[in-house]
Image (spheres, grey):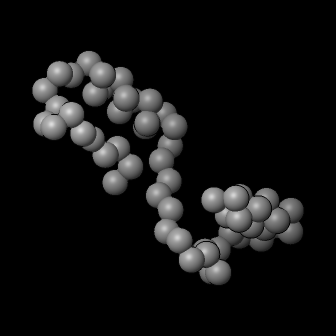
Amino acid sequence: MRALIRKAKDAKERGERLTRSGIRAEHGFLYVDDLADACVFFMERDDIPNGLINIGT
């Protein structure tokens, strides 16, 4: 993740678009507002199967 942040910063400084070339791992991205909404939604429920959820997929 650190390398991705560095690539984004460098691309912005050069006025270029960020590309994924050279990045070996796949990363999922999630807007913080969506995460917060999901957290509130699931905290208000008590019928979650197995007590496990995956918000990022």
- Residue at the image point whose x is 30% and y is 22% from the top: 43
Q: Identify whether 42 is placed above or below 29.
A: above
Residue depicted at x 50% and y 53% = 29
Q: Residue 14 appears in which quarter of the rendering?
A: bottom right
- Residue 5: image location, x then y, percent: 71, 58
Left or right: 51, with 55 as reference point: left
| Quadrant housing residue 46 | top left
Camera sees residue 30 = yes
Answer whether residue 8 is visible to the viewer in this image.
no
Q: Quadrant of the N terminus?
A: bottom right
In the image, farthest residue toward the right: 13
Residue at the spot x=47%, y=58% of the render?
Answer: 28
Count of numbered tags: 0
Q: Position of residue 49 (x, y in %)?
A: 13, 36
Residue in the image at 49% along x and 68% along y:
26
Q: Position of residue 8 (x, y in %)?
A: 73, 62
Q: Relative to residue 53, is residue 23 depicted above or below?
A: below
Determine the image quadrant of residue 53.
Answer: top left
44 or 25, which is in the foreground?
25
What is the residue that sits farthest to the front in this orientation?
50
The residue furthest top is 44
Q: Front-most of 39 and 33?
A: 39
Residue 9 or residue 48, whichever sits in front = 48
Q: Is residue 44 left or right of residue 4?
A: left
Whole-percent x and y of residue 40?
Answer: 35, 23
Question: For this view, does 12 lie left or right of residue 46?
Answer: right
2 shown above or below 38 = below
Question: Which quadrant holds the C terminus?
Answer: bottom left
